[in-house]
Image (cartoon, rainbow, N blue to C red):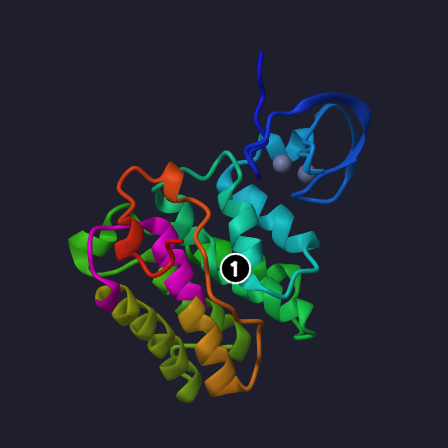
Amino acid sequence: MRFLCPICGQELREAHAWLACSFCGILEEGEWGCPNGHSQCEGCRLAEPAEIIERVCAQSQESDPVQIADLLMSHPSFHAYGPEHHLLVAPVLLAALRNIGRPINAEKIEMALRRLADIPVAVCASRGDCGAAVGVGCALSLVVGATIHSGWERSLALRGTAHALERLADLGGSRCCKQSVYASIEEGCRLFREELGLELPSHTIQCRFAAKSPECRKDRCVYYF
Ligand SMILES: [Zn+2]
Ligand SMILES: [Zn+2]
């Protein structure tokens, strides 16, 4: 029987060793290991999307939100397309901000997951919305403490979602949840930098999921390489 590493796709080898989980970092005795050093503990292997997001965001030291998102999207609970992508953007942005020294606690990340849990599938086409884009507004809201009574904070949250949605519309084509996540993270990083002076690492994003996305637009997508 062959087992493949969910993170890099390499065939796993029998290891029988203590391995650090690539998702949550805990050490667990495992029978199979990836030649590139990846491993997943039992808890992470069985986790649903919200749980794996919480586990990864709790322990990650990474300040590049795209790196955190790529790790999460390689988890077996993330499919090519699906509402699990709605949950991802805000927690990843918040974890990256915490890792550059902002006061983001676990409660804020849990709150983001709760706020984003009820967005239905296919809202991009059915009502001109996108869970990934809403994640930008949600992250900005949680960082500045927006409420229905606040002024510029509420405007900033609205602007976050609006700009991410506009970017998705400009990218065009049929839906791709990876593209939505990447574009939303880019817009989120831009707004955190321009509006709040918070600089997260930025670089050209290269999508690792094209081969697993049956409707990938390939060289018509800005993230395809
Ligand atoms: Zn691997
Ligand atoms: Zn784990």
> Which x, y percent locates residue 69?
52, 54
Task: Indicate the secondary structure of the residue bearing disc 1.
Answer: helix
- As drawn, the residue found furthest toward the top would be 1
Residue 68, by quadrant, is bottom right
Tell me, yes or no, if residue 146 can be seen here.
no
Residue assigned mark 1? 66
> Which x, y percent locates residue 187?
40, 72
Which is more toward the observer, 119 or 170? Answer: 170
Taking 172 as reference, is 210 left or right?
right
Residue 136, by quadrant, is bottom left
Q: Which residues are magenta?
A: 170-185
Taking 37 as reference, is 70 left or right?
left
How many numbered discs, if any?
A: 1
Q: Give the overall secondary structure of the magenta segment.
A: helix
**Residue at (78%, 34%) from the top-left corner?**
19
Tell me, yes or no, if residue 220 can be seen here.
yes
Is 160 magenta? The answer is: no
Amino acid type assigned to the residue bearing label 1 in the image = Val
- As drawn, the residue found furthest toward the right would be 18
Residue count near mark 1 (Cα–Cα under 10 Å), binned few <14, some 14–19, many ≥20: many
User: Looking at the picture, does residue 191 appear above or below residue 85?
Assistant: below
Is 180 magenta? The answer is: yes
- As drawn, the residue found furthest toward the left would be 126
> Which x, y percent locates residue 215?
26, 41
> Which x, y percent locates residue 92?
54, 59
User: Looking at the picture, does residue 143 appear above or below residue 178?
Assistant: below
User: Looking at the picture, does residue 137 appear above or below residue 150?
Assistant: above
**Residue at (65%, 68%) from the top-left corner?**
98
Which is more toward the observer, 36 or 134? Answer: 36
User: Looking at the picture, does residue 36 appear above or below residue 2?
Assistant: below
